[in-house]
Amino acid sequence: MYMTGFADEASPSLDAQIRVTKELGWSNIESRNVQVDDFPAGNIHDIPDAAFERLAARLAAAGIRINCFGAAIGNWSQKIDEPFDRSLAEVRRSIPRMQKLGTKLVRIMSFAVRDGEDQMEAERFKRVREIQRMFADAGLTALHENCMNYGGMGWPFTLKLLENVPGLKLVFDTGNPVASDDRSQPRPYPRQSSWEFYEHVREHIAYVHIKDGIYNAAAKKTTFTYPGEGHGDIPRIVKDLFARGYDGGFSIEPHMGTVFHDPNSRHSLDAAGIYVAYGRRMLAMINNIRTESQLPPHR
């Protein structure tokens, strides 16, 4: 197994992302938003070529690798009734950059949830099949995340997506169900259960995002917490993963110093400190679970 994280939650600056990663003693970053020197910040598949070349050189010099592209492909900002061109362009930009960096994993989604009941499933499945095929043909693995998208509406939707997209694997986010409507149930939609979602999709999981939180129904708001302090069932899920022989990555996404997709969220003054503390707490939890399971600790 290995540890990694969305280091843009510590800072958009590449240098700061490298710094917190090394402070944790890790050698991986899941790259999403990044700013290189004076170039504008952006997703790793969107930054200018000159910025990307500097990023690649600086990571190599620091001994840090990008284990996964936290891509925007098919995410909550992309509607299924809009042209497919944007997604295809993002895939085409991602592939050569992943190959240059030696990155094998890319996070994708299944497009924004539509208002009403018609989710245009046939079009979604067609598009995700094409995205998955393009990456697979390049020797890369596309992983669907249960976020604010069709597959994130509940575990039955993820399973239906998998049935219609052969070869697709999952990145499971422990915290997203806490904040999400269970659209497989009648209105008013209840919250999802992280454990229930995990239990139904675990055979397809190739990678894990670690996020935790508590949903306040009265305020209709999720407060994000350190791992194990919320309703994300993280200890139970991690223990079950190890019992099943999981040896992949755990990627922290605290959402405590900043929430990437919230336009009103800004990096707190101690976002980097929160990120490092989060990583240390998660690693301590993992090693406690491994000790209890009579497995060697992760170093």
Image (cartoon, rainbow, N blue to C red):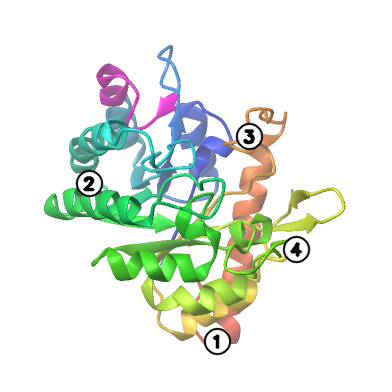
Q: What separation in Å lies between label 2 and label 1 (alpha carbons)?
A: 33 Å
Q: What separation in Å lies between label 4 and label 2 (alpha carbons)?
A: 35 Å
Q: What separation in Å lies between label 3 and label 2 (alpha carbons)?
A: 30 Å
- The disc placed on residue 293 is 1
Q: Is residue 140 magenta?
A: no
At a point 69% along the width and 44% down the height, the residue shown is 256
Q: Amino acid at mark 4?
A: Glu
Q: Amino acid at mark 1?
A: Ser
Q: Which residue is mark 2?
A: 102
Q: Nearer the viewer, mark 4 or mark 2?
A: 4
Instruction: Name the outermost residue toward the right.
Output: 218
Q: What separation in Å lies between label 4 and label 3 (alpha carbons)?
A: 22 Å
> Could you tell me if the residues under marks 1 and 4 are in contact, i.e. CB atoms within 8 Å?
no
**Coordinates of residue 90 in the picture (x, y in percent):** 29, 34
Q: Which residue is mark 4?
A: 229
Quick one: 237 or 147, which is closer to the camera? 147
